[in-house]
Amino acid sequence: MSRKRRAAAWAVTGLAGLFVFLALVVPDQVTRLPAGSSPWAALVRVPVEAVAALAVLLVLPARARGITAGVLGAVLGLLTVVKVVDIGFFSVLSRPFDPVLDWPLLADGYRFVDGSYGGGTAVAAAVGAVLLAVGVLGGMVLAVQRLASVAARHRDAARGTVGVAAVAWLALALLGTSFVPGVYVASDSAAALARDNVLKVPAAVRDRQAFGAEVATDAFKDTAPASLLGGLRGKDVLLAFVESYGRSAIEDPKLNAPIGGLLATGTKQLAADGYAARSGFLTSPTAGGGSWLAHSTLQSGVWIDNEQRYRSLVAGDRLTLTGAFHKAGAWQTVGVEPGVTYAWPEGQFYGYDRVYDSHTLGYHGPVFGWGPVPDQFTLKSFTDEEYKRPGRGPLAAEVTLVSSHMPWAPLPSMVGWDQLGDGSVYQAQHARGRPAEEVWKDPADVRAGYSQSIAYSIGTLLSWVRTYGDDNLVLVFLGDHQPPPIVVGDGASRDVPVTIVAHDPKVLDRIDSWGWTPGLKPDPQAPVWPMDDFRDRFLTAFGR
């Protein structure tokens, strides 16, 4: 073999070794290392999986060694794909990917890219992801087979390497050596990743069984219609979810400047109009995304933190909060869902008489980021179609405000309520707005965009109350979850603010025992409840 060919062969072997080494030692939370830690230091590790695999391959005959190397490469390639997906999940949802329960979220991710960046980008991203997964899987098989072949040709040196590495790994494990907190030099991360993902299968089975028992326990299942929500008879009740409105939005100094002032001013303005408010916190079952998990948790009074629970819930007949209004027979129930762009059978589960989605709200303007309809237009359409409809009876409506959905660019702004028309007025705003591709180059710009979007959504809602609300209005508004770590960091709680606004003081008298903070902004020491507690507490407080 010529010198050039020998050098090329060793280069290929070196790249194969580097590929396998990185697959074994890169932490799945590499984007969440402690502050001040070097990502390079996290790679100073001795992977026990490599030591064990090499020891096994060296004692096998040639044919068995080739087959075993291929199988090991395929397993490691699959684990590498899972690890890459984990890294993405940690950066957005602050948790790892669940290979049993999370497959539907990939479709949701595609729809997010489609809605935020366009169909071409979504297709390119999907194709790129598939090609990357196939490339990693195939490349890992070839890499492990090559390393096994080289080790067999240099058996004595390979045996010595295995012995030295095994002793080193054992010594480092006993000493607990690490250069990055929580990332040990004696690594078994690939084995741990495999173990954790395998164990998720029986965990999902156990969770399904546990959920069946939880959802069957319902203190209000057999409550007579006449005994439901007697304390709100004759009132119009609006339940509004504000996308990504988390506790950090009102407490983090990097985020709360526009929002804190808005809430303080809004409290005074509402008081001048005869309204009062009480605020607290709820702990969401999700973070960074998965709004439907939070919506269903609050509505059903059951903890919904994965797709399996969600699908099981909406396939059943659990009494929801809006379903209780429907069952009582004293309200027309309406769902206003501007983020719904396809068939949505869940509307029946939630007990809605009518549902307005992105296709039926009458919007013909541009799309701002992910949200198909700006929040102000959503509220105006609800007002025209339902709230100010002549001769109507009491309403119970759930409205989802989506303008504060990631990527927070470009952003709409308030216009006169009488200027909205069919939404064409937003064309100029959209043309002037900064595109998401530009904003996401700088995390500081991302955080600023997030804060501005929350201020817009809440400001729009408060303006709607002051413009259209009357003495019978009861508004409950809350966040669904915290935004992703790029906005709030890795240590943020899962708490979201929740507020009840009413003109009739008797409404707030019924929740006086809750200990919530007067006004639109909950005090840092305000009560914090799990989000699934809210339904039962609300139905109890306003029961007959």
Image (cartoon, rainbow, N blue to C red):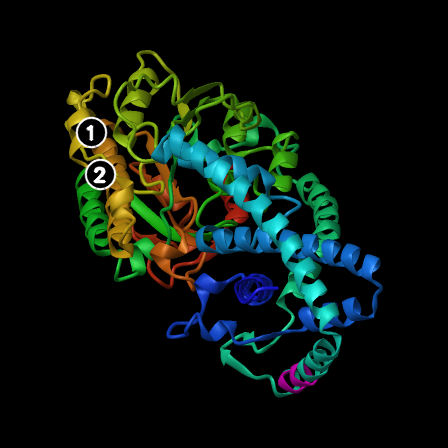
State which mark lies toward you, 1 or 2.
1
Q: Nearer the viewer, residue 94 or 137?
A: 137
Q: Position of residue 418 (x, y in %)?
A: 16, 21
Q: Where does the magenta region start and end?
A: 167-172
Up/down of 105 relative to 264, above or below: above
Mark 2 sits on what residue?
274
Side (left or right) of 283 relative to 67: left
169 in magenta: yes
Q: Quadrant of the N terminus?
A: bottom right
Q: Main secondary structure of the magenta part?
A: helix
Residue 161 occupies quadrant: bottom right
Describe the element under mark 2 as helix, strand or loop.
loop
Say which amino acid is labelled 2: Gly
Q: Position of residue 523 (x, y in %)?
A: 33, 59
Q: Which mark is residue 505?
A: none
Residue 271 occupies quadrant: top left
Residue pictured at 17% horizontal, 41% vertical: 272
First in sequence, mark 1 or 2: give its number.
2
Residue pictured at 74% horizontal, 58% vertical: 69
